[in-house]
């Protein structure tokens, strides 16, 4: 059983909202499987709370289910047997129910009500304004369809705009907390599992009891009856139309076409024709636009690259989607052979860079340098790429880093190459202090360790 991990800040925020002297309306949203329901369920334990999951049925069917659940909640058989054709009476019944503590109402998959009746946000806005906002009550509206939740609850055009007292966009769990799920696994194993499941609790739960990453993939992804076999299709079909077009964009990026011009050329589209798809995928937290970390105006940078920032999506489009013909024809073994032969070099080693960038912030907090950097990320130009560049934007200190997920130990040659590549970075080039860090999953050679012991500007981290 997966335990509740790394939601302390969000949980505290909900508790603070609960402890307000007035009413509270919180929007809790994020991509599917990220743990919204788990957070809400954990929060309402031991509280006087009503949890209602909206289905994709009609508004009338959901209203009937909500009425019956409310009747059980307030122990009112008259309400249960009544024919109710509006929401106001149900909410009024909750308000009339006497309680010694604050009442909490959680409406999960709230966006489904807006899908069945586009006027529902206006209906709920009236209920909030005329009935709930001045009462000692807390309402949490949860939703998975990010675009719809934003349009129905957060956007300026939404009837509910300005009513919320807070919002939480729940993100995936950082690698820093990953060991809490798998306390018995080595760091290397943790990185391999993270490279597939990312920080999505539902995926982590599926991979929990397997002895190695390949067995977990075979059972949970490759098998046609497995939960994750068609997961990207499931996620996207609920968010977008033209699902084939979105698949083509993601597949193209996963294949290494990260520049806008290359994506457009690969798809035989004009660059302007891609804007809608890229913007939507960014809003869904599936891709991100990344620029070299030293760029002063990221929005205007011409060096922007589009990268898939969902680990499972990246894995699926690199290894499952291209091999669907093998899997569908019953040749699962061929697909698994490709994964075994290429997973580390073509996938895990890239995710390792993200893990190292996250680790940089931990090292920063641990005072591993005599200054604090405030920016960290990747850097590149037309000729050179550096895995990590971190700097203090108000000072003159800059760190260059390399991340090696190699079978062998890393030696002095990697440091020399990093020092040379650092010369390509123009940031305060004539007036700066250079520092270096090398991450290696399998350690370092003796000569590099000896060198690091004699240099204050070099940090080795395994």
Image (cartoon, grey):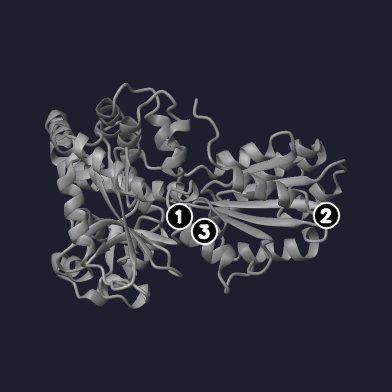
Closest to the camera, between mark 1 and mark 3, is 1
Look at the image and tell me whether residue 388 can be seen.
yes
Residue matched to label 3: 115
Residue at disc 1, secondary structure: loop
Q: Indicate the quadrant where residue 398 lies.
A: bottom left
Residue at disc 2, secondary structure: loop
Question: Around disc 3, counting alpha carbons within 10 Å, would you say few (fewer than 14), some (14 to 19), or many (20 or more)?
Answer: some
Residue at disc 3, secondary structure: helix
**C-beta proximity under 8 Å, tags 2 and 1:** no
> Relative to residue 450, is residue 384 depicted above or below?
below
Front-lying residue, 419 or 133:
419
| Residue depicted at 48% across the width and 46% down the height | 366
Residue matched to label 2: 21
What distance separates the C-alpha of mark 2 from that of mark 3? 33 Å
Checking the image for residue 379, the label placed there is none
In the rendered image, residue 410, in percent from the top left (x then y), is placed at: 20, 40
In the rendered image, residue 372, in percent from the top left (x then y), is placed at: 47, 58
> Relative to residue 343, is residue 106 depicted above or below?
below
Residue matched to label 1: 370
| Residue depicted at 62% across the width and 62% down the height | 120
Q: Considering only order in the chain, which callout, 3 or 1, is on the residue closer to the N terminus? A: 3
**C-beta proximity under 8 Å, tags 1 and 3:** no
């Amino acid at each position: 059983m997966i335990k509740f991990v790394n939601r302390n800040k969000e949980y505290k925020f909900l508790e603070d909202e609960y402890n307000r002297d007035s009413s509270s309306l919180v929007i809790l949203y994020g991509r599917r499987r990220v743990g919204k329901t788990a957070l809400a369920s954990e929060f309402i334990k031991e509280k006087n709370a009503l949890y209602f999951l909206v289905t994709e049925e009609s508004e009338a069917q959901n209203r009937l289910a909500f009425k019956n659940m409310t009747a059980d909640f307030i122990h009112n058989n008259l309400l249960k047997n009544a024919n109710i054709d509006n929401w106001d009476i149900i909410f009024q019944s909750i308000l009339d129910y006497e309680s010694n503590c604050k009442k909490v109402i959680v409406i999960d998959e709230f966006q489904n009500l807006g899908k069945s009746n586009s006027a529902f946000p206006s209906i709920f806005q009236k209920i909030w304004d005329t009935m709930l906002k001045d009462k000692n009550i807390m309402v949490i509206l949860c939703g998975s369809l990010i675009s719809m939740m934003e349009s129905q609850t957060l956007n300026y055009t939404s009837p509910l705009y300005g009513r919320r007292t807070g919002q939480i966009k729940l993100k995936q769990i950082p690698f820093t907390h990953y060991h809490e799920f798998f306390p018995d696994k080595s760091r290397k194993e943790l990185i391999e599992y993270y490279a597939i499941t990312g920080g999505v609790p539902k995926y982590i739960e599926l991979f929990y009891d397997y002895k190695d990453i390949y067995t977990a993939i075979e059972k949970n992804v490759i098998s046609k009856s497995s939960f994750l076999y068609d997961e990207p299709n499931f996620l996207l079909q609920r968010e977008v139309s033209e699902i084939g077009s979105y698949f083509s964009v993601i597949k193209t990026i996963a294949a290494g076409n990260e520049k806008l011009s290359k994506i457009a050329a690969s798809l035989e589209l004009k660059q302007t024709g891609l804007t809608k798809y890229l913007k939507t995928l960014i809003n869904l937290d599936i891709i991100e636009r990344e620029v070299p970390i030293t760029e002063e105006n990221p929005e205007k940078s011409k060096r922007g690259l589009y990268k898939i920032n969902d680990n499972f999506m990246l894995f699926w489009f690199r290894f499952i989607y291209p091999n669907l013909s093998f899997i569908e024809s019953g040749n699962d073994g061929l697909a698994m052979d490709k994964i075994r032969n290429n997973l580390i070099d073509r996938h895990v080693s890239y995710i390792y860079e993200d893990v190292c960038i996250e680790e940089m912030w931990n090292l920063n907090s641990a005072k591993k340098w005599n200054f604090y950097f405030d920016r960290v990320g990747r850097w590149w130009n037309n000729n050179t790429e550096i895995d990590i560049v971190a700097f203090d934007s108000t000072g003159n200190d800059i760190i260059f880093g390399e991340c090696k997920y190699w079978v062998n130990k890393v030696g002095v040659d990697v440091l020399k190459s990093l020092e040379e590549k650092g010369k390509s970075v123009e940031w305060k080039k004539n007036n700066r202090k250079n520092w270096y860090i090398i991450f290696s999953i399998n350690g370092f050679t003796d000569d590099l360790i000896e060198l690091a012991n004699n240099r204050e500007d070099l940090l080795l981290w395994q």
